[in-house]
Image (cartoon, rainbow, N blue to C red):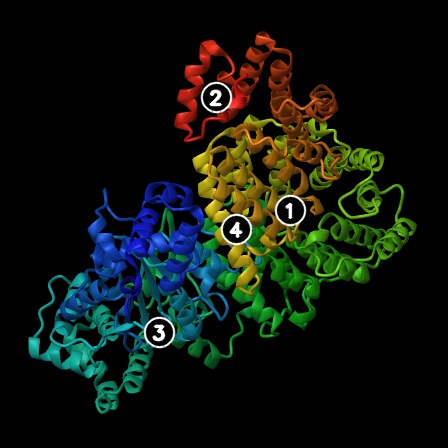
Amino acid sequence: MEWREQVSAREGEVLAAIRGHQSNAQIAAQLDLSIRTVESHVASLLRKAGVPDRRTLAALADASAAGGATASSAARGAGTTGAPAAAGLPVFPTSFVGREQELAAASTALEQSRLVSLVGAGGMGKTRLAVEVAEGLERDVLFVDLVPVRAGGVGQAVAQVLGVVERPPGTPADAVIDRLRSERVLLVLDNCEHVIAEVGELVARILRLCPQTTILATSRERLAVPGERLVQVPPLGDEAARLFLDRARATDPELVAESAEVEQLCVALDGMPLAIELVGARTASLGVDGVGAALDDLLRLISGGRGPDERHHSLGDVIGWSLELLDDDERVLFRRLGVFVGGFDLDAVAALNPEQGRGAVADLIGRLVDRSLVVHRRVGAATRWSLLETVRAVALRELETSGEDVGPRYLQWAAATAARMEARIDHLEAAEFDAVADDLRHALTQAVRGETATEGIPGGTASAGGSGGAAYWLAKGLGRLSFGRGQVMAADEHYRTAAELAPDPAAAAEDLGLAASVALTTANGETAFGLFMQAATRADSAGARAVALASAVVAATRFSMAFTEPVPRDRLVALLEEATALADPADERSEAVLAMARAWVSGETPLEPDLELSRAAVSAARRSGDDALVLGALDALGTALANAGRLRQAHRLSDERLRLAATASRFEPAVAAELVDLFHVASTSALAAGDLPAAASIAEQASRDGAVATHPAIVAPRLIRLCGLSGRFDEALAQADVLWDGWLYATTAGVESELSSLRGDWPASAAAIVALVHGLRGDGPAFEEWRSRARRMAHVADAADSLALAAAAAFSDARVAAHTGRYADAPQLVAAALVPFAEKWWMAYAHATGAELAVVAGLPDAAERLAEAGPAAAENDWAAACLTRATARHTGDPQLMAEAVMRWERLGARFEHAVTLLLLPERSAEGRSELAALKAAMPGHQWIP
């Protein structure tokens, strides 16, 4: 049964609203339901549709409504403006001949199925047909050439074409799924057969989770994925002669040939387009008669078999025949080209042929292109060439038969290419690295496996596995280049490989340290700790060992939340003592790392760095001149200041980190790890200081910075806090749905993913702000529901028992009570809001709202409560505005109330601005209008004195 048939009438109404991108709160208001009932319907719809979140559900509903359950027709029915975009689609210099029947069959199949596979033997023209099909469709196209891809690299290849980067612990395939969830595209996967199981797994996930994505695959065998439609690509029939004459006349426009003679030749070539093109390219020099005579023996050899294997064998024979017609220089170059798994440019080919000048090499390539043995491709302004997969197999066979070993030259070219790119990494275009990445990795793999000898390579030895030369520098360069491209998992692998190939212990320790820094970009402190400890073991100098041990201490304290089992403090103290004994006091970098370790380990619990030791760490880091160390030391100082309640200073320190980050290199793993941490801390610091405009600016910067890209559910808590405090209630509730969906997935899916960090208690304060928004809008049931959810996220039965939630929950409860006029519990709520919270980020909000509740509720100790809240409010602009309003109410000072209005306006706090206007008789109408626009409830009658 199709999932839409299982949807009830009420669920259908909810689904229609989800398609309109309405939040649960908006749906509840529209359908006159409670938010809890709406959420129950949404959960039912997600279960019936078999999708993980509402965004995918909306896309699936759009596709189903627009085209009878196919995303392909949905794309056509939706209508587009302008020409569809195409990424990576090959451009062929020759015309497309024939295949009218297969072209129509494939186009029709794509109207009826979201997965169509063009299946046929090698050399049948599947790629060319797929391109023609794609160009005939009115939708965006993503073309992924899988020829150079090896096992484990399919997800990365697709992600590369999509322009997305992985977000560990998620995989590249996860990033692909996330991007394609709401994309209306045709994904063309070309040459799947050698990675068919991996392709099938990814395709199955896309079909299940990305309802508007259609897939066109080419392969020698079916993908065996449910729903797959096959279109066979057989040998050419009558069109074969047309293709032969088209290619022959491209080089000899005056060619005259007997049709029977041409047809006989094409039949003997099994109607294979590639074989026909190869033979046709020689007709200008030999004529049809000459070609026929030269091929006579070959045609008799292959005329018997007609099965796929025999056809493929005959194609190899045709290519082999073409090679017999090459001169010596052409043949040598051709076989050497077989080492390239991807495309190649003139520099790459020249590196493999040092005995020839560049001009001679360019001429040889041109002659091979003329013979259809090499394919010319233009990538932007760059000129590149490649071999078709079947032709490359013949080239490799020729290379093996010759006994020639071009592996050392290939490895040397790869290492030199990586070094050149790394030297200008700040200005390197992604497409430039992508063009050679597969070959750089292939060269490294061959070296690591011992398939490439390194004699004659500077720094090399007879064993590539132990080489400190080209293979080592290639691995290290690939680590940095991959990291700069956003390929975090690949970078980690390459740095670890570099450590294995390192020429000496010092280099190995450095490479393990780089791998540890890569881990810290995803806040994976546990992995980083292990790698730093390995680096300490490998280090051959006391100074290097000291730095590695101190770095391990920092990782274990600063990133302790990522550990399954925290490292005992006494062990960390012992490691720091060992590092201190080993360190050279004259080494400024070593002293900076040690100073930071001392600061972070100084507290009885993690994340409690000592204030004075943190100041010393900043001074030491500045002396070292290392941007990453300065950024890290400033974080220690900012944390210490915040813990001391000095929130404005912590906020100013975050501003300094942001200014430094603007000029720091994002291609260094240690710096990138600081950037990821920085945007989270800077946003938190700005809100802790009540500086809403700064928090909004930081959120905007983070959204534009690819170095800190992460899943929407990870960003949602920050946006909820900002939007809730700013009175942007609709935005806050929309993000609430994203957070809740993500939290449910993280806590129930049973798998590690980029959402796993949501299992911690840090999102709980955002849930308290969602409760606040519902309370201020007068939705009591939703208010209570989100209070309960906040406790669930904090893993406590009582909010007061949670370090992360206590102050935020007390703030939310007090503010809602003051607004709704429910003062029966005011004494208890005021007392709960004015405790000295251990976690300072939300304390000023709680203290200020608690004091205001005491005033509004007419509690006898209101004056004392205002005084009690003063110190915390002095550290927070929002709290200061709140206390100004409360004091104005308590004293009846209209000028002070007008000042409160101005304070709220400067902060951009729309809701608080509106309810403060109600307290000024001459502006109360303006306040009512603003509240209506915010869909907020009018305050209780006691709000206006």
Q: How many C-alpha atoms fall within 10 Å of the one at disc 1: few (<14), some, or many (≥20)?
A: many
- C-alpha gap between disc 3 and disc 1: 39 Å
Q: Is residue 302 left or right of residue 755?
A: left
Q: Which quadrant is home to the C terminus? A: top right
Which amino acid type is shown beneath numbered disc 1? Ala
- C-alpha gap between disc 3 and disc 4: 31 Å
Q: Is residue 928 left or right of residue 605?
A: left
- Labelled disc at residue 225: 3
Q: Which residue position holds label 4?
A: 485
Which amino acid type is shown beneath numbered disc 2? Ala
- Looking at the image, is mark 4 or mark 2 nearer the viewer? 2
* Residue 453: image location, x then y, percent: 61, 72
Determine whether label 2 and label 1 are within 8 Å by CB.
Answer: no
Task: Tell me which residue sits at (31%, 54%) in the image.
Answer: 10
- C-alpha gap between disc 4 and disc 2: 47 Å
Along the polypeptide, which appears first: circle 2 or circle 1?
1
Along the polypeptide, which appears first: circle 3 or circle 2?
3
Secondary structure of the residue carrying numbered label 2:
helix
